[in-house]
Amino acid sequence: MNYHIGTMLIDENFDGKCDCPLCRIKARVDQRLTESYLGEGVMEDNTRAEVNKLGFCDHHYSLLFASRSKLGLALQISTRLNTVLKEIKLPKNAKEAKKQGDAVLKLNETCVVCKYLDEHMIRYYKTVAQVYQNVASFKDRLLATHGFCLEHYAVLLKYSSCAGGKQKEYLADLYTVQIKRIEQLKKDVDEFTYHHDYRQVNNPLSQGAKDCLKETSNLFYGDKFKI
């Protein structure tokens, strides 16, 4: 599946809001890729071959199942079942049973949508660094963010070399927004726990303290952004 990696989603999502901009970009790309498996293109030979080989994870199967195009999903699953049938055999002994069990478990470890999603997101991580290098105003937009979830912060570091001669400055700015987010979250969590001391029960909680457990989930596991 072809997907053009430009800067539009980066421009739209590095907007100073409190959630991780890469989580929002990933959600948009995920939606577009998933929808691409509901059109006529899914019946092309190369696409059916990939679905046959890789199938869908639980997340993407659920998204496809929730759509109105049940026939498109059924045709692809019919193809995928051919691969599953090849792995189901009557084991002759314990060695064959173990080998077959491992092979069957691996059937659910791959997903054709996840494969392309991962590829596209790597290109976005690189593009963010390139935009930082080439667009002077992007520095201020990066610094206006409220940091990233840990996964996306880590991969931005991983591909920071794509910022070229500005890599050191880019890393410093990534660190600045990320450490600010974590330190503020730590402060909010401490306020939340301190508030449960009976002597503090009548003192009002700040909004940050009220939201701290949700924000901690977003930091560790990614923002559950809804399209």
Image: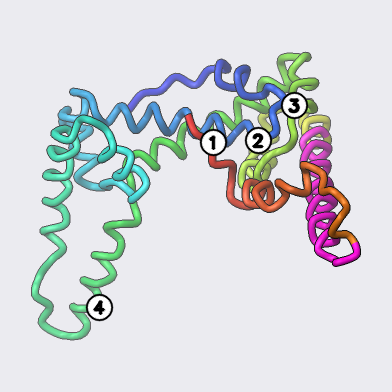
Q: Residue 143: x, y in percent?
A: 79, 27
Element at badge 3? helix
> Which stretch is magenta?
173-199
- Disc 1/disc 3 C-alpha distance (Å): 19 Å
Which residue is labeled 4 in the image?
98
Q: Earlier in the sequence, mark 4 or mark 1?
A: 4
Q: Earlier in the sequence, mark 3 or mark 2?
A: 2
Q: Earlier in the sequence, mark 1 or mark 3?
A: 3
- Residue at position x 15%, y 31% from top? 45
Viewer-nearest of labels 4 and 1? 1
Pointer 2 with pointer 1, Cβ within 8 A: yes
Label 3 CA crowd tier, 10 Å (few <14, some 14–19, many 20+): many
- Disc 2/disc 4 C-alpha distance (Å): 45 Å
Q: Earlier in the sequence, mark 4 or mark 3?
A: 4
| Residue 192 forms part of the magenta stretch | yes
Which residue is labeled 2 in the image?
19
Which residue is labeled 1 in the image?
225
Viewer-nearest of labels 2 and 4? 2
Element at badge 4? helix
